[in-house]
Amino acid sequence: MGDTGEDARRTRTEGAVKAGNGKFIFDFANLKKIDAGTGYSTAHGSVVEGERMQCALVTKERGTGSRPHHHPNEQWNYIVKGTLRVKVGDGPEQLCGPGTLLYFPANVVHYTIATKDEDVVFFAVKDLSHGIIGMAADGTMAGGHYDPGYGPGKK
């Protein structure tokens, strides 16, 4: 059922690494980092794509994150380090720390923002019905969320 040749080596997300075809083990933390939410988030990290799933090790710097957005693929995030402010659909905003598993259904608007305490690292898994990048809920791709005092170039 799998593709062969060059088509099998293409990724849905530019800059992602393609797994399979002899490539099965990855030094995830040291792979090339890419923007993982271009146009609506400050997220960046390594992305590896298989045949049906994609994984990412993502960082959001403290005081930054995503504006409300959605994507056609479902997503899981496991927080490794730091605390995120999280809102999914019509639910309340919640603080979520290390060890928390987050589920984002397909096409449901959500956001995650790193608190001002420290950078956040999370492990993300999405199906490959779409790439890693979604779309801002307001239709603009005007950039990520920045808490006051945490804009580009500020820490």
Image (tube, rainbow, N blue to C red):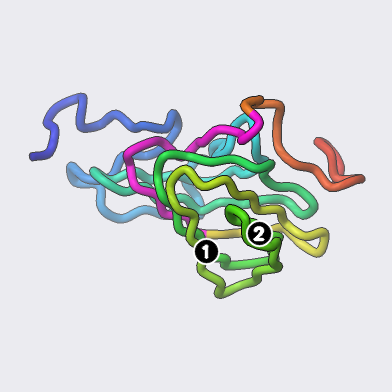
Residue at screen point 19% across, 46% down = 22
Cα separation between marks 2 and 1: 9 Å
Q: Residues within 10 Å of mark 1 (few under 14, many from 20)?
A: some
What amino acid is at disc 1?
Leu
As rendered, which of 27 and 68 lies closer to the eye?
Answer: 68
Q: Position of residue 114 (x, y in %)?
A: 72, 56
Residue 136, magenta (yes or no): yes
The local secondary structure at tag 2 comes to strand
Relative placement, left or right, of 24 versus 77 is left
The local secondary structure at tag 1 comes to strand
Residue at screen point 85% across, 45% down = 150
Circle nearer the N terminus (2, 1) = 2
Residue at screen point 59% across, 40% down = 69
Residue 146, above or below 63:
above
Residue at screen point 67% across, 50% down = 60
Image mark for residue 86 = 2
Relative placement, left or right, of 108 versus 97 is left
Q: Position of residue 23 (x, y in %)?
A: 25, 47
Residue at which label 1 appears: 102
Residue 59, above or below 97:
above
Q: Position of residue 138 (x, y in %)?
A: 66, 31
Q: Residues within 10 Å of mark 2 (few under 14, many from 20)?
A: some
Please identify the quadrant where the N terminus is shown.
top left
Residue lying farthest front?
90
What amino acid is at disc 2?
Val
As rendered, which of 23 and 117 lies closer to the eye?
Answer: 117
Q: How many marks?
A: 2
> Which stretch did the figure color magenta?
123-138
Residue 3, magenta (yes or no): no
Residue lying farthest left?
1
